Amino acid sequence: MSEIKGIYTLWLREVKRYLRDRARIISSFFQPLLWLVIFGSGIRFSGGIGELSTQQYIFPGIIGQTLLFTSMFMGISVIWDREFGFMKEIMVAPISRVSIFLGKMLGASTDAVIQGIIVFVLGLLLGLQLDVIIFMEALPIMLLTTFGLVSVGLTIASFMESLESFGVIQSFINLPLFFLSGALFPVRGESVPVWLSTVSNFNPLTYAVDALRTIILGGKWQPLYPLHYSFAIICGFDIIMIAIGTFAFSRRK
């Protein structure tokens, strides 16, 4: 019971910190809006998206972008806690390092999903046909996606000694994952370089974005992968990254 209580306490702390940061919540609304309005209105694709408009095509990708950037950024909480001495108190608490990692991971994942939901609701304002069923189908994909991505951020942060170092590494990982996922432009088609299509197969965000696109756009989108296949890849990515993250935390002194 102490392990479960410890996980819950760390989860609640991360969620409360997020909900009290109004600037972050407001920015989570306007930043995706700028991407959808400016990028979606200013860019036109020559093929690869069928009869979809650019805004319809990139909308699931913007949700994926929000999940990615938010999840990876949450790793910075490890560095903050270390600088203010809170991490030392956690480490000497009578709970395992695995529970510490899981508590922070679940809390950060909840925060990232909340921002993803804000972007999802934003689609209604843009006139996209979304309903409760679509939302309930997309929610598990969003949640599972954040598990692996948050684990990546926490693992990296556990080895970083400064905010500046974490920011550099975070950007170095975020941008390739985002741009090579098909979030903003097709990664399949005659006009797409072979290397881009090949690399996208090894990008976990590709499967998350394609799954979201399949659920949200329905028959308007021809999936790159079967939905169950994308689901399995995302789950496999989560298991690997959670295992690596818990191991990294267990090795910390």
Image (tube, rainbow, N blue to C red):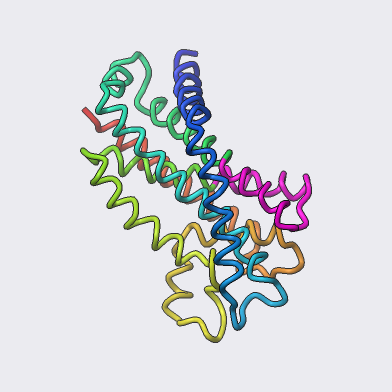
Q: How many marks?
A: 0
Percent across and percent down for residue 251 are 25, 33
* Side (left or right) of 74 relative to 168: right
Q: Main secondary structure of the magenta part?
A: helix
| Residue at point 43%, 60% (across, down) | 177
Percent across and percent down for residue 233 are 53, 55
Query: Looking at the image, is 196 positioned above or below residue 26?
Result: below
- Magenta region, residue range: 115-144
* Side (left or right) of 161 relative to 86: left
Looking at this view, name the residue that lies furthest to the bottom: 190
In terms of image quadrants, where is residue 230? Answer: bottom right
Query: Looking at the image, is 18 positioned above or below residue 68?
Result: above
Q: Quadrant of the C terminus?
A: top left
**Magenta-span inclusion, residue 126:** yes
| Residue at point 61%, 48% (across, down) | 119
The residue closer to the viewer here, 194 or 42, is 42
| Residue at point 74%, 62% (across, down) | 218
In terms of image quadrants, where is residue 37? Answer: bottom right
* Side (left or right) of 179 relative to 156: right
**Magenta-span inclusion, residue 139:** yes
Query: Looking at the image, is 194 positioned above or below residue 246?
Result: below
Percent across and percent down for residue 225 are 61, 66
The residue closer to the viewer here, 34 or 117, is 34
Percent across and percent down for residue 15 are 51, 28
